[in-house]
Amino acid sequence: MALNRKQKKQLEAARKKIASLQQQLAGARDQPDDPTEVPRLEAEIAKLEEQCREINASK
């Protein structure tokens, strides 16, 4: 079964957020001003990737 519109929108939004977070993560690794920022960004990316997997699994 194909994804419905809501699921497609959720995937699109999550992918955009992941791309943004990955850029922030790269910057945080280059300039480690806040030692808690890198793990926070990594955790948020992992959460969004899991959300994408769940949406794809519900097809």
Image (cartoon, helix red, strand yellow):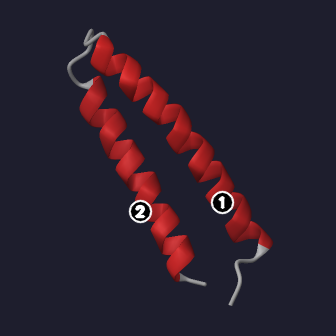
Q: Kindly indicate the quadrant of the structure image that contains residue 6.
A: bottom right
Q: Earlier in the sequence, mark 1 or mark 2?
A: 1
- Percent coordinates x, y for residue 58 in the rendering: 55, 83
Q: Amino acid at mark 2?
A: Glu
46 lies above or below 41: below
Q: CA distance from mark 1 to mark 2?
A: 12 Å
- Percent coordinates x, y for residue 1 in the rendering: 68, 90
- Judged from the image, the secondary structure of the residue bearing numbered disc 1 is helix
- Percent coordinates x, y for residue 38 in the rendering: 28, 28
Q: Residue at x 20, y 19 (%)?
A: 35
Q: Residue at x 62, y 43 (%)?
A: 16
What's the mark number on residue 10? 1
- Residue on which the image places disc 2: 50
Please state if 35 lies on the left or on the right of 43 as rendered: left
Question: For the residue carrying disc 2, how many other residues have a C-alpha within 10 Å: few (<14), some (14-19), or many (20+)?
Answer: few
Q: Residue at x 36, y 51 (%)?
A: 46
